């Protein structure tokens, strides 16, 4: 019996691919940054709560729309609405998102690949804190080096996507996600053996609710939303390749659990490491990864050079794995459009998207150097693309998906999708429908307003 090569071959493959899309660089630096800025353990508890009440329902919403579309996310909204053409334009969100997000994400992913190379050749040895700062500034503002590494990331991503759903995306997830966890567990073990690691554990797991205020709650809500990459159409695109026997709610919880576990384990790597050196704080964003941590690795393991080398190498290989699992879904969003609607071969569609993203990615990279004074709407290309994606497309897209499934789609259609046409029980269906109709749109509006700075007075 022949199997459809345009669907994931197994439930495990589908879960790992979706988890790979959600797990990315943000789990390694945005989560520790947000946790460090917002008081530690209390923030984490609120984040987990919103992951269950907000992140999972929105992710399941994308799953339901995508699977109902059946291999073509472009027409999924029109099909699920019963032929209402006014919703067809929503199918363009993955197309636009794919180009924009991969263009600037690949720049940062290229940085991780370069640092993995530096770790491999022992480039961190003997450097001072000032050296790490100066090196990062010099590298990120260079005209050629970041562009080269960005292109390598896109080429690797293109190769995987071009191989297809089963041989490329699913097989890549089956290899890279377990490898990512192996890297994480090795690093956690090393980090917990560091002096003063207990301080990092206390900060991570001992809640201080006196630090909780409206700003912390908004930040936790935002982290739960952004961590899963919902609203872009990544998960909606992947869900087009889901088999009809997949339990959307159950597997959505599995994906969210994997994403949250990676974030928490990243905290177990970073907080003990940073707290092992007096005076450092884990709230520095990208500089935490490219300036603070290389310095930490050298200072902590300075007397055991091979351990510093191994720790640094594994850490940046971990970042490369996390970057690739996400970049695959980003490229697939746009490539799927050309493949399905323009009837291009999958390899050609992947190459076209890759070439365009390389060009846009070059502009984004140059915005840190030669083009730092070239702006649109007062922002360089990197910041502009990030603004459009994170502050506009994700919250607006997420809200519209909830409104669409909660208010536009016939409830019988939604119920059939959630229960696999009545073949499985969905005890949380009523709660889920209430959330996407009322609670999720309200939360996303608050996230949207907060990202635009309208609640700045709360900080």
Image: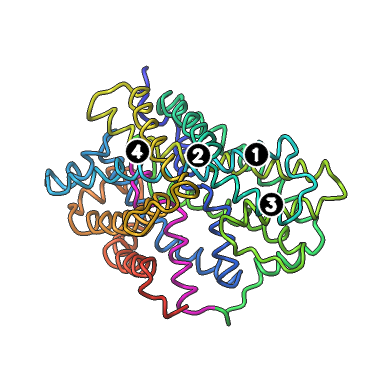
**In the image, is residue 16 part of the stretch drawn in magenta?**
no
Secondary structure category for the residue under label 2: helix
Secondary structure category for the residue under label 1: helix
Q: Which residue bears the numbered disc 2?
A: 325
What x and y, as percent, mark residue 427? 37, 57
Q: Are marks 2 and 1 in contact (CB under 8 Å)?
A: no
What x and y, as percent, mark residue 333? 35, 38
Q: Are marks 3 and 2 in contact (CB under 8 Å)?
A: no
Q: Residues within 10 Å of mark 1 (few under 14, many from 20)?
A: many
Nearest to the eye among marks 3 and 2: give it.
Answer: 3
Magenta stretch, residue numbers: 212-239
Asked if 81 appears above or below 336 in the picture, the reply is: below
Question: Of the residues under marks 2 and 1, which one precedes in the sequence?
Answer: 1
Q: Which residue bears the numbered disc 4?
A: 333
Nearest to the eye among marks 4 and 3: give it.
Answer: 3
What x and y, as percent, mark residue 269? 68, 54
Q: Residues within 10 Å of mark 3 (few under 14, many from 20)?
A: some
Question: Of the residues under marks 3 and 2, which one precedes in the sequence?
Answer: 3
Q: Residues within 10 Å of mark 2 (few under 14, many from 20)?
A: many
């Amino acid at each position: 019996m022949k199997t459809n090569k345009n669907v994931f071959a197994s439930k495990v493959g589908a879960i790992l691919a979706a988890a790979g899309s959600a797990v990315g660089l943000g789990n390694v630096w945005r989560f520790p940054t947000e946790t460090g800025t917002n008081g530690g353990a209390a923030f984490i508890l609120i984040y987990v709560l919103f992951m269950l009440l907000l992140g999972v329902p929105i992710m399941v919403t994308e799953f339901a729309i995508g699977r109902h579309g059946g291999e073509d996310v472009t027409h999924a909204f029109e099909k699920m609405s019963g032929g209402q053409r006014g919703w067809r334009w929503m199918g363009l969100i993955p197309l636009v998102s794919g180009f924009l997000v991969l263009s600037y994400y690949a720049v940062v992913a290229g940085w991780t690949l370069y640092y993995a190379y530096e770790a491999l050749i022992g480039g961190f040895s003997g450097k001072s804190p000032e050296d790490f700062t100066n090196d990062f500034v010099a590298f990120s503002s260079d005209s050629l080096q970041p562009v080269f590494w960005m292109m390598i990331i896109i080429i690797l991503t293109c190769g995987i996507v071009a191989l297809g759903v089963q041989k490329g995306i699913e097989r890549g997830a089956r290899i890279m996600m377990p490898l990512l966890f192996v890297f994480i567990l090795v690093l956690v073990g090393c980090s917990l053996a560091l002096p003063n690691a207990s301080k990092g554990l206390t900060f991570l797991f001992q809640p201080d609710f006196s630090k909780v205020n409206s700003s912390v709650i908004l930040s936790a809500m935002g982290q739960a939303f952004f961590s899963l990459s919902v609203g872009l159409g990544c998960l909606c695109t992947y869900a087009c390749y889901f088999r009809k026997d997949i339990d959307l709610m159950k597997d959505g919880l599995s994906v969210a659990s994997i994403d949250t576990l990676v974030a928490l384990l990243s905290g177990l790597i970073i907080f003990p490491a940073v707290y092992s050196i007096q005076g450092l704080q884990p709230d520095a964003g990208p500089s935490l990864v490219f300036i603070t941590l290389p310095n930490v690795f050298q200072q902590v393991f300075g007397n055991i050079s091979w351990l510093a080398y191994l720790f640094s190498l594994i850490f940046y290989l971990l970042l490369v794995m996390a970057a690739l699992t996400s970049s695959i879904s980003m490229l697939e969003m746009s490539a799927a459009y050309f493949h399905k609607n323009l009837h291009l071969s999958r390899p050609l569609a992947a190459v076209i998207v890759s070439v365009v993203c390389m060009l846009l990615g070059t502009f984004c990279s140059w915005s840190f150097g030669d083009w730092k004074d070239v702006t649109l709407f007062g922002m360089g290309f990197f910041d502009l693309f990030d603004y459009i994606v994170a502050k506009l497309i994700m919250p607006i897209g997420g809200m519209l998906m909830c409104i669409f499934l909660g208010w536009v789609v016939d409830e019988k259609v939604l119920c059939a999708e959630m229960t696999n046409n009545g073949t499985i029980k969905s005890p949380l269906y009523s709660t889920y429908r209430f959330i996407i109709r009322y609670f999720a749109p309200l939360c996303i509006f608050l996230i949207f307003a907060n990202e635009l700075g309208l609640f700045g007075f709360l900080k």
